[in-house]
Image (tube, grey):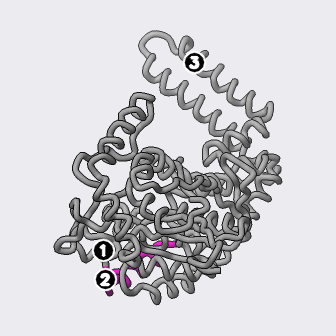
Amino acid sequence: MRLGEAGALCVVAGQQPAPGLGPLYALHKAAAAVSLARRWQAVPVFWVAGDDHDLAEASQVEGLQVPLSAPPGTPLNLLPCDDTLKTWLETWRSSLPPSPHRDPLFARLTASCAGTWSDWMARTLLTLFDGLVVVDPAWVRDLTAGTLARYRASEPSALTALAEHSRKLTSAGFRLQASPLPQTHLFSIRDGKRQRSPEGDSPDVLLRPVVQDALLPVLAMVAGPGEAAYLGQAGPLYEALGVSRPPLALRPPLTLVAAKDLEHLKAWGLPTSSALLGEQGILQALKAAHPPSDRAVRLRQAGQRWESEILPLAGEGLEGPAASTARAVREAMDALAKRLERQEEERLGIDRRRAQALGRWALPSGKPQERTLNAWSVLCRFGEGLAGALVDSVDWTQSGPLLAVVEA
């Protein structure tokens, strides 16, 4: 089925172009769109937001700075994939842990690094998802010209309605995703830079989904929380153009975990959902499931008791040495108790380092995995089959954080 054929509706997701697809949630969105499209016999479409010019966001990959050969304000669909970028890919590759998948996947990523960043993003997506259609606004300018012409004619009244709608949202306690602008929601490209202009042919972040939905026969849009907030704010722009807002399918909040890691959790007497707790949460869950033995408790109590007895026995004039000695005794007893606890954990098969590594992976730096890790880095760990596994793992009947169990 192709776009334009009778009855061909689509499920749309989108993200700005970035090396290796950008944040992990971009991979999740694409997988969710393919999953929902299969469920409804629709066409999955990924809208590459190449008109975006947030180079600062797009050029950061897991703490590494991507070299840019264009000044700030350059749209990403005009950003070239040059030799400097290809050289940087080797730096990124070598920063990742070795795996059977890393080198072949980076060879493919480097080979497809040509044209613009939008071209690169499209090739990357098409290698991972069968049946996915990829669109960049620069490729369909002629098809969106009529919609933008209608918007220009209605812009004064649309801006007024948007400002009033935004005021009501603010009064109701909602935080605006974008400040309503008094002049225009259109951009033009001048000297390679994107600048606001009433005569422009590139919509901004609030107008973009309206133009997209006017162009495509959208059955549903896969969106994250931030995108959903943008769409809620953009209502007056939809009304100004007479475009129906499609239903939203909130992107499933997936956390990827290797199957072998979940087996360890089970062996330690923890539920698999413990993986969502992060490093400290898993350690606390282990402590709750396997509290210190009576011997370890008594060792700590002895250290505290001796600390309290040393101070009065030392008497006047020896307060300083007595305090340091008492502290040393207590700390030594604590250290002995910890060694005993580790010994007991080893007998139970508990590996604290593995538990900590799992927690750091599932919740890096205490933040959601999907916002911290790059999609390509994760593919290098699990292999390109991860994309299909994600499509199959999406469960639209569930809400809240979900575990996606992957064979490493």
Q: How crowded is mark 3: few (under 14 residues within 10 Å), some or many (20 or more)?
A: some
Q: Is residue 108 left or right of residue 118?
A: right
Is residue 92 shown in magenta?
Answer: yes
Q: Which residue is denoted by mark 1 in the rendering?
A: 67
In the image, residue 99 lies at what x, y percent?
60, 78
In the image, residue 315 lies at what x, y percent?
50, 11
Judge whether residue 272 can be spotted in this image.
yes
Going from N to C along the chain, the mark reached first, 1 or 3, is 1
Q: Are marks 2 and 1 in contact (CB under 8 Å)?
A: yes
| Image quarter in which the N terminus is found | bottom right
Q: Which range of residues does the magenta coloring cover?
A: 80-96
Q: Is residue 320 left or right of residue 13?
A: left
Mark 2 to mark 1 CA distance (whole Å): 7 Å
In-front residue for pair 54/178: 178
| Residue at the spot 58% in from the left edge and 75% down from the top edge | 380
Q: What residue type is labelled 1?
A: Pro
Q: Which residue is denoted by mark 2 in the rendering?
A: 84
Mark 1 to mark 3 CA distance (whole Å): 63 Å
SS for dot 3: helix
